[in-house]
Image: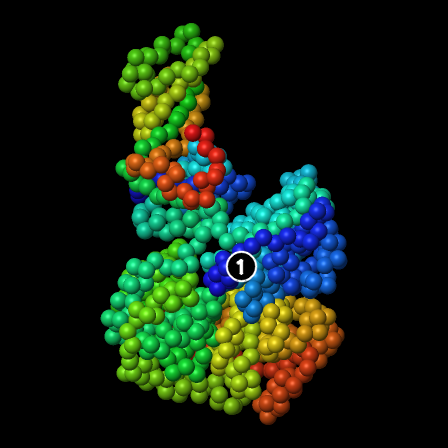
Amino acid sequence: MKQYTICVFTENSIGLLNKITIIFTRRRLNIESLTVSETERKGVSRFTIVIKHEQREAVEKLVRQIRKVVEVLAVFGYLNEDVVYNEIALFKIPTPLDSRPLDMEIINREHKAYIVFWGLDYVVLQKTGTEEEIFDFFRYIKPYGILEFVRSGRVAVAKTPKGLVEYLPEELEEWEYYL
Amino acid sequence: MAATVDLLEKEGVVTAENNQKRLSGGQALMECLLAEGVDTIFGYPGGAIMPVYDALYDYMDRINHILVRHEQGASHAAEGYARSSGRVGVCMATSGPGATNLVTGIADAIIDCTPMVAITGQVASNLLGTDAFQETDVIGITAPVCKWNYQVTSPDEIPEIMAKAFFIARAGKPGPVLIDITKDAQVASMSKGFSYKKIDRLPGYHPRVVPKLDQVEKAAEMINAAKRPYILVGHGVLISEAMEEFRAFVEKADIPVASTLLGLSALSIEHPNYMGWLGMHGMYAPNVMTDQCDVLIAIGMRFDDRVTGNAELFAKQAKIVHIEVDPAEIDKIKKADAPVVGDAKEALKLLLPLIQEKSHADWKQSFRDLEPEERATVNARDFAKEGKIKMAEVVRMVSDKTNGEACVVVDVGQHQMVGARYYDFKRPHSYIASGGLGTMGFAIPAAFGAKMGAPDREVIAFIGDGCFQMTIQELGTIAQSGKAVKMIILNNSYLGMVRQWQQLFFDRRYSFVDLQNPDFITIAKGFGIPGHTCENRESLSESIDKLLASEGSYLLEVIVEKEDNVFPMIPAGTSVSEIRLK
């Protein structure tokens, strides 16, 4: 099973999440992770969807089906090597007085994780990285006790020099940019 | 599609006469429909669509509203209208049950690429999501079966959204669009004067109408090099009105043609290159020869499993040229060696000058050589003239008496296949069926819709006794309209196709297929439609004459052979070469 990242650029309209996800549901494809946000163009949203599949051809067909949704402006399917990708995870770790102190050097230098919030007897650590790196850190930090753990969906950009403007329809030129 | 091309040419701004007045949402909707040239709506009023119906009251001299008896009838009638006229069919219903009743017709329209705009009322926007009276999430329900849907909550949105709706419904691969309008948006006045601008392009949706030349050149090269080329013509040729271009292409390259079910009537049955229709119950030669051709040219068809049987085995020896407007269909079922993405008409226009004039007399003859075997088994049995009347006799007689000129609407089942097999289609847009969804109950409303879309044509519906009872109430719609729809029930008191499968593949375990039927003729008379029953072969001709001579609608019930089977047949999931003649 290979992992695929599917990037879908859409108009930002109500109900579109449903229209996109039913394409996966209908084909009994499980979505491993899903991230949606507005892009640098106002009114253009970007879905980053991770799935696993045995057949590249089936993923290509899926991409074409997604493209059929009227509000979809562009769709791309990538293998992991084609994209720069990351996730973000937050770990809530208990720090009562008698606990083993956190080794910040290892946390910072080896795992590149950071404390983002100090509570009275807990801290919140933030780790950014690939799924693998996040779970490496998970395994490292687990003995300290984890009160809560949350991981985001993947965000990804393609390893091409192209910008969004180059593959979105021309009509959108009149649309406003954040940048 | 042709309609799209027209639209491109006629692009312009349409402004209502009274654009200084502040129209209500309901009035704005009526103006939009007029601007799109809508002359007929099939619908059913109810609480959440009442402001639209109130507006319609003032427009009834310009927009013909047909009151159906069930909303499913409205959506099928809109399909029939669209299929016979080539225009967008419009249906309308209230929220909740009204909207959900439209869904079957909408699902039918998406799979058969029928342009349709469905308008539904919705509860007021402040009640959305509160489980209010007759509230359903129709946007959520129809999302998987609509080409596009949208919920309008302000009257100001209506002109732009309706323009989008009509564009999307007819552009590229046509399909159904649903617009859900909250009650407050129907009642409230627009904040500005009404103006309407037709749309020919959307940011995310601009289907390729004219194919890329290099794709066409590659296809032409493959076709020119073929020794045994073979064309499968689909619904796309009819949708894009490419019949003339198609005929010219067929004649120049002298290629044998088989039709899919919905491609029937794209080429006249009298054409020397026409070999019949193929698929699960299609004809023998077109099916068998699929495994013999070296280049298969599929035009406006989508390799449905009822066409291919086992897709992996289907024409595996052949190179495939696939002309199709929807890029998602390319390689979906069969890998195309030369895909051509574009409208069939435009593709054929480009292809025609690149094609060499050829003669494939021997290859065509090899199709003809197989026909005696089929005639000796299937046709001989279907016209054996013993026992009760066979469906085939009825269809053939109607075909002869109408000279193959009628618009035939069929329901779903054995009669659908017999209709396809024995009616000699000579004019385009003459076989209207629920192909992809296989919707029983389709024919009565669709036939009525077809008559509304093509009032000058003789519309004849072949309907099974099971199908007839699924939308029987639409006899009331037909009667009230005064339009002449000729209906023939082929009554075997069985769900015939299911029974056939049970006989062949379930060891004759006839599980719930036996129907105790009502007196159809008395029922029709109750609705004000005359009719009679024909039970013997001797009176069949006279019975059909009576049906055809009727000035208004007429119901002919023919009692047919109870356990008649439809052959040829390719058992599901097998290869086309495993076709059975008995």
- Chain letter belonging to callout 1: B
Percent of width and height locating residue B188: 71, 43
- Secondary element type, mark 1: loop
* Quadrant of res A109: top left
Q: Nearer the viewer, residue B487 or A172?
A: A172
Quarter of the image where the C terminus of chain A is located = top left
* Residue A49 in the figure: left or right of residue B117: left
Percent of width and height locating residue B524: 70, 75
Q: Which residue is mark 1?
A: B10
For the question of whether residue B506 can be seen, the reply is no
* Residue B187 in the figure: left or right of residue B292: right
Q: Nearer the viewer, residue B48 or B51?
A: B51
User: On screen, A135 above or below B574?
Assistant: above
| Amino acid type indicated by mark 1 | Lys
Quarter of the image where the N terminus of chain A is located = top left
* Quadrant of res B410: bottom right
Task: For label 1, count other residues whose C-alpha is less than 10 Å away and answer few (under 14), some (14-19) or many (20+).
Answer: few
User: On screen, A24 above or below B53?
Assistant: above
The residue that appears at 66% across and 79% down in the rendered structure is B555
Percent of width and height locating residue B232: 38, 70
The residue that appears at 36% across and 78% down in the rendered structure is B251
* Residue B227 in the figure: left or right of residue B186: left
* Residue B340 in the figure: left or right of residue B148: left
